[in-house]
Image (spheres, grey):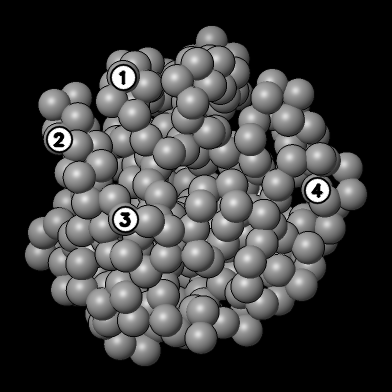
């Protein structure tokens, strides 16, 4: 099962436990490392820089041979914490950083100075070639079966396209819920995979049991796209509450998003409102259930320890 990602991160299996907003935590990543894969946490899961530093220290202390850990950075203007988070990651150290939703140029420059690898989320060839030219160490190929902010291209087509035209490793993200799915991605030519949704219903995940049970009870047919979280289309479970509020942007947002000057501010406001709603649903008992997940929850049948999820994906 060795692939290029295994060598790149010195891990047993070429798998990254994907960074998931509000879901990922140090307990999950520690178990991921013990299981021979890499784990990643969104930096935005920590409200303050001291909390982020504490998480890094905990992971460094728990790191085992054959495991790696990293953090995800939202690198567009909607994340006002980005530059300080990058500074802390570079000062404290980690194995890799995954960038999303913006230009990774500054992250690549600063990270490489201290020996941190940078993997960049991409959804098409044009952006993949841009980040390769900037010096990215690998591409996270986000396909149309991914959870959260997904792409528009099928896993097979995207992997083959990027492998043909790019020279850095291609890590496929989306559509892996079983070992058969994992093997298929490697068969298409992927150098590794990033897997998120199967780990939501894990014992170690820091979300409510309602969220975890939703991943067990709902399936691929229940995943819908919404614009009402971050302003960028995002996949969520189609709960009664999501059906009630709808998945399209409001008419006012639609009008304002056509104004080049106001568009950035509209997205920042929507991002803030959406993140607060998502956090409430993930962490508290509430009827306002906005649960982010991908179609691979089709294969989630019970709540399991991270160790067992890894075993199901690799053996």
Q: Which residue is mark 2?
A: 54
Residue 269 visible in image: no
Q: Position of residue 61 (x, y in %)?
A: 20, 45
Q: Position of residue 16 (x, y in %)?
A: 48, 57
Q: In the rendered structure, which disc, 1 or 4, sits on the residue that comes first in sequence?
A: 1
Q: Position of residue 99 (x, y in %)?
A: 51, 34
- Mark drawn on residue 162: 4
Mark-to-mark CA distance, 2 and 4: 37 Å
Name the side, left or right, on which 205 lies relative to 271: left
Check if mark 3's residue and mark 2's residue have beta carbons within 8 Å: no
Check if mark 1's residue and mark 3's residue have beta carbons within 8 Å: no
Q: Residues within 10 Å of mark 2 (few under 14, many from 20)?
A: few
Mark-to-mark CA distance, 1 and 3: 21 Å
Dot in front, 3 or 2: 3
Question: What kind of element bears circle 4?
Answer: helix
Q: Position of residue 248 (x, y in %)?
A: 49, 50
Q: Which residue is mark 1?
A: 91
Question: What kind of element bears circle 2?
Answer: helix
Q: In the rendered structure, which disc, 2 or 4, sits on the residue that comes first in sequence?
A: 2
Check if mark 2's residue and mark 4's residue have beta carbons within 8 Å: no
Q: Which residue is mark 3?
A: 64
Instruction: Give the residue displayed 76% in from the left and 24% down from the top.
Output: 133
Up-down relation of residue 200 to residue 48 (above or below): below
Dot in front, 2 or 4: 2
Name the side, left or right, on which 308 lies relative to 196: left
Q: In the rendered structure, which disc, 3 or 2, sits on the residue that comes first in sequence?
A: 2
Hey, which quadrant is residue 218 in on the image?
A: bottom left
């Amino acid at each position: 099962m060795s692939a290029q990602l295994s060598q790149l991160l010195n891990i047993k299996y070429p798998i990254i436990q994907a960074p998931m907003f509000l879901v990922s935590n140090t307990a999950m990543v520690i178990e991921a490392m013990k299981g021979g894969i890499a784990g990643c946490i969104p930096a935005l899961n920590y409200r303050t820089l001291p909390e982020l530093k504490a998480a890094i220290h905990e992971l460094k202390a728990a790191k085992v041979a054959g495991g790696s850990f990293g953090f995800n950075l939202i690198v567009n203007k909607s994340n006002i914490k980005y530059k300080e988070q990058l500074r802390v990651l570079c000062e404290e150290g980690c194995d890799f950083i995954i960038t999303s939703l913006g230009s990774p140029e500054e992250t690549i420059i600063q990270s490489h100075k201290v020996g941190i690898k940078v993997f960049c989320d991409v959804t098409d060839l044009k952006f993949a070639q841009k980040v390769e030219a900037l010096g990215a160490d690998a591409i996270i190929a986000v396909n149309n079966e991914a959870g959260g902010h997904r792409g528009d291209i099928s896993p097979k087509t995207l992997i083959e396209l990027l492998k043909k035209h790019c020279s850095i490793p291609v890590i496929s993200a989306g559509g892996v819920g079983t070992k058969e799915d994992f093997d298929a991605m490697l068969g298409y030519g992927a150098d590794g995979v990033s897997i998120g949704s199967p780990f939501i219903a894990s014992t170690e995940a820091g979300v409510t049991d309602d969220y975890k049970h939703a991943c067990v009870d709902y399936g691929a047919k229940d995943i819908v796209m919404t614009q009402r979280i971050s302003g960028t289309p995002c996949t969520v479970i189609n709960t009664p509450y999501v059906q009630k509020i709808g998945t399209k942007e409001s008419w006012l947002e639609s009008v304002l998003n056509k104004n080049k000057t106001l568009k950035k501010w509209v997205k920042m406001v929507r991002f803030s409102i959406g993140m607060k709603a998502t956090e409430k649903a993930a962490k508290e008992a509430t009827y306002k259930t906005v649960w982010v997940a991908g179609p691979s929850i089709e294969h989630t049948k019970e709540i399991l320890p991270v160790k067992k999820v890894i075993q199901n994906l690799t053996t």
